[in-house]
Image: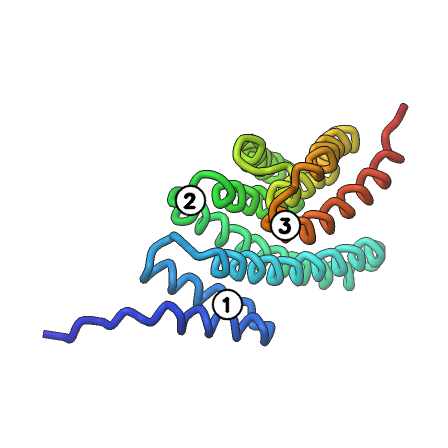
Amino acid sequence: MSPARTRPDREKLFFIADLAGEAGRHEDVVKQLKLIIEHYGPHLTVDERSLLSVAYKNVTNTLRNSWRIVDTLHKLQSERKGRAQLIQRQRQRIENELVDVCTDIIGLLDRELLPAANEGEETVFYSKMKGDYCRYLAELGQKRDRDRRAELSLKAYELAYQHALKTLHPLHPTRLGLALNFSVFYHDIKKSPLGACHLAKSAFDDAILSVSMADSARDHHMLQDSMAILHLLKDDLILWSGEIKI
């Protein structure tokens, strides 16, 4: 009879994940946090959840930036068939990797994290993540695939936003971060600067109006992250409002 497997220490798994993050080994971060989920269940601590989010964001940001560079080169070399084919092959390879990573985190969210999420900020956080990675997928592939992925992204963002409006303070950084990314979805995917401005302005105005109500130490600490997101919302509003046809 084989001896029972010893469950790995959670603090050690997190330490290794954090160390991997510091070293830029983001795929290793994901592996360690998946081990925590496997052995301890889908209820992650705030630190574990944040580390998972940052790791996937860094992996996908690298691939998305690579894809954009190669896509631009492909357009510039479109008249040179030999080179264009080689560039297209490399672009497809990067695209396949990006699809795999996005599909992986969406699957993890659907199977484990969202079903176990607590009401309030955790549900908003994970639903926003799903919206983000479906949005990245909606930038790729054939039109039919893009439309299907865009619909999945929209549903995830809508669920997150409706929940945020009911459960989170207007100045909460998770609620503001959701508004920022949801407005980007309307601008980049739906090609609607009007819809993007409407959502961004609503979130911006609600947050500014609520600043006077931020009267606790917790609210004061929250303001630092929130103000940074408000600046991004303001910048986007200025940029997108110039695109609206009167």
Q: Identify which residue, 169 or 2, lies in the foreground.
A: 169
Q: Tell me if I can see residue 191 in this picture.
A: no
Q: Check the image and name the residue furthest to the left.
A: 1
Please name the residue shown 77% across and 33% down the image: 197
Which numbered mark, 3 or 1, is in the foreground of this view? 3
Q: Check the image and name the residue furthest to the top.
A: 246
Q: Where in the figure is residue 159, as x and y percent of width and height?
A: 53, 33
Q: Amino acid at mark 2?
A: Ala
Please name the residue shown 75% across and 55% down the image: 71
In the image: residue 176, left or right of residue 19: right
Q: Amino acid at mark 3?
A: Met
Mark 3 / mark 1, whichever is N-terminal: 1
The answer to whether marks 2 and 1 mark residues whose Cβ atoms lie closer than 8 Å is no
Instruction: Give the image quarter of residue 91.
Output: bottom right
- Residue holding disc 2: 117
Q: Where in the figure is residue 234, as x and y percent of width and height?
A: 80, 42
Q: Tell me if I can see residue 76 in this picture.
A: yes
Quadrant where the image shows the C terminus: top right
